[in-house]
Image (tube, coloured by chain):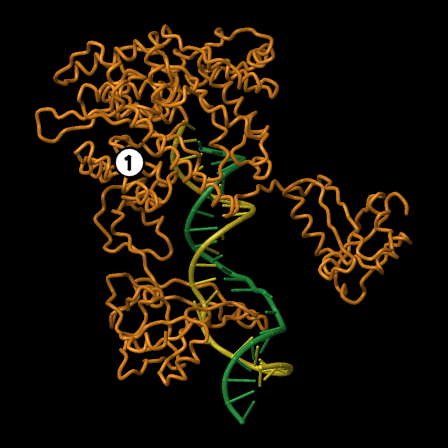
Chain colours: A orange, B yellow, C green
Amino acid sequence: PATNARLQMPVAGQVELESSLGIKRKKGKVNTERNDDTGKKRCSVGSSEKKKLEEKEPEAIGDNDAAGMEWEDGHVSPVECKEGYSHDLGETVTVEFTDVPSSTEKKSVRRHTAEEKELAELMHKVHLLCLLARGRVIDKACNDPLIQHLLWNGVDTLKLDANKLRSLVNWFHRTFCIIARSADKGSFESNMAFALQSHEGTAEEVCALSVALFRALNLTARFVTNMDVVGLKPDAKAMGTPNQDGTRLSTRALPCSPVAAGHNEFNTLSPARLEVNTEHRFSRAKQRGDLGNLKRTSACKSLSKNLSNCKADQYASTSKDESSSSPNSFTSSNAEIPKRKGDVEFELQLQMALSATGAEIQEMLAATSSQSIGTLLDYTPLKKLRKNAEVASNSSAVWSRSGPPLYWAEVYCGGQTLTGKWVHVDVVNDIIDGERKVEAASAVCRKPLRYVVAFAGGGAKDVTRRYCLQWHRIVQGRVNPEWWEKVLAPLEQLELAATNDSEDMELQTRALTEPLPTNQQAYRDHHLYALEKWLHKNQVLHPKGPVLGFCKGHPVYPRSCVQTLQSRHGWLTEGLQVRENESPAKIVTRPKRIFNSQSRESNSNEDELQATTELYGKWQLEPLQLPGAVNGIVPKNERGQVDVWSEKCLPPGTVHLSKPRIFQVAKRLGIDYAPAMIGFDYRSGRCAPVYDGIVVCAEFKNAIL
DNA sequence: ATGCCATAGTCGTCTTTGATAATT
DNA sequence: AAATTATCTTTGACGACTATGGCA
């Protein structure tokens, strides 16, 4: 065989390959076994075709079954062609296609499959459980009498008021250095004790120490953390965001792991993404304008060159935007110019810039090249320079550290009134009562709020609501609430027993008093508000009012007015039926059934053939009323069956039994029964009823079983 | 930075009541 | 003679949802 033996492929197979090639943009292979029927069908490479290969004759093949098929040329590499030359049956022929980038190349983006989503959700859940367990470990350590005693160094606070708390927090902030990582001393208690001794520790440890001290002072205090959990969605973007505190280096080691190789993009930084990541860091560094801090090591020379090439200073451009856009947008009525969210974030970022540490820059440098990843893993924790922090701290409370607020304490302050208040106390960042700033600071640090959980008494409580002003922004990043509440339920009991105060009223109030979003998109599935334009096909507003406000001219309705409708059959499965004389709340069109023959004829009166479904709301319903069993006779439908769409659809006085050969048993016992039809199946191109067991009168249940 | 729209891809839902021949 | 079982065939349209990119 010559170098480029040619064979022909039916277009069907070609198309199939092209689609996959278009996605993967790699070489594709088709293995065809001689005796494999499937292979023949798909590629038509059989024994007769082998002869064609020898002759290098690109003739039509498979005359019979390929009638009407189109054929295209393909190539077989010489090596594989030789192999294919063997006359042994059972040998395989490998046809290899090389994807040539053509003009018709599609930028097809592979989407996440259901399996990947499920895996991501599982990882998310497992991670949540781990973080809950972690929180309980820390909470327990905060109760450690030895640690509490060690902390008790002459601080004599008998009564708590804001000023004394402030001095405590300030003492903590002055005394402890925050480091990115600490060596594990075997237990969290040991780590805390070591941190206490050395006056340096992770944010987690220092925060835990503060909780321990508050408890030693007989205050009711909780350890609170914004749990930094892996994403719920299989989105690698979350992994690719800049890691500011440098504590989670392990994620960068993952691309080498076999798990990562198996599940592309999962938990890994692909090279491309790493670049993006680095780019982002560049821009952040530029924004800080503190590149002078860079140590000119050999590793960073090329980097600094890159940076100097970037003439467009982001800070400058942003300032320009400010000056040009502000007069246009905000000069009309208000004397005080309102701040956009971006402005707030920018200011915070500027504050962060002032306190940027050498450690972080080094980390950034290390992440730039793949060779330096090793050094990144080895690098010794660098102390945060307190000098820098003090530069940043000014009259207004800011997050003086560059790290995101992940750990803080809540102290219960009784005050004069009966109802107390949980007060946010962050010794890491030297902030008291800054709960309204947490969300913005977290957003700036790319660690958005998702699950803020408070730990006490071995239990835990979700207090995200206290810190979240825009619930709709974070709700899509959380697991389904049923699962989460089920997990938390026993922990909440423990927490409540320890703190003896339920702030549920406060959290509930916050949940119900969210401001109206200003953009329309936010009203999609918003938990409180609704726009008519975002209603689903099976939804209506009932009643249509009151109007709570307007968004871009569209009236805003309470979400409670949105009613989800169902067809008569849909309600039937829930054991409900539509009341008499009720007219449909909405009529929607259904997809047309295709009838192969004479489709053109139906075009003329297409509108009349459009099937519709009548939908009803729950206000039009009443409990299902079915004829009950009488004298051991099961009421059946016109087909002699009982439709068991759900157990709620059983006629009164009957039961649904599903056991093998139960028909015969009922028959031999002379008991009246009816087959239970539980649904439909699509087989042979048509729907077929699916049966499962029988329905008999309840009194015969035991006899039959 | 943000909002808004279009586009494109994946997934779930809705559809909603055999015929025939062979074998037991 | 009656009952049971195997085989045939293997939808497809649309909405919801979600990334992504372009543009303002």
Of all chains, the one bearing label 1 is A
- The crowding category of the residue bearing disc 1, from other C-alpha atoms within 10 Å (few below 14, some 14 to 19, many at least 20), is many
The amino acid sitting under disc 1 is Asp
In this rendering, the answer to whether A226 lies above or below A376 is: below
Assign a secondary structure to mark 1: strand
Task: Pinpoint residue A209: horizontal percent, then vertical percent.
Answer: 29, 19
Task: Pinpoint residue A459: horizontal percent, then vertical percent.
Answer: 27, 35
Q: Nearer the viewer, residue A441 or A320?
A: A441
Q: Residue at x 57, y 25 (%)?
A: A275
Where residue A351 sits, quadrant-wise, is top left
On-image quarter of the C terminus of chain A: bottom left
Kindly identify which residue carries mark 1: A462
Res. A253 in view: yes
A212 relative position to A683: left or right:
left
Q: Residue at x 47, y 27 (%)?
A: A241
Where residue A61 sits, quadrant-wise, is bottom right
Q: Nearer the viewer, residue A247 or A341?
A: A247
A601 relative position to A562: left or right:
right
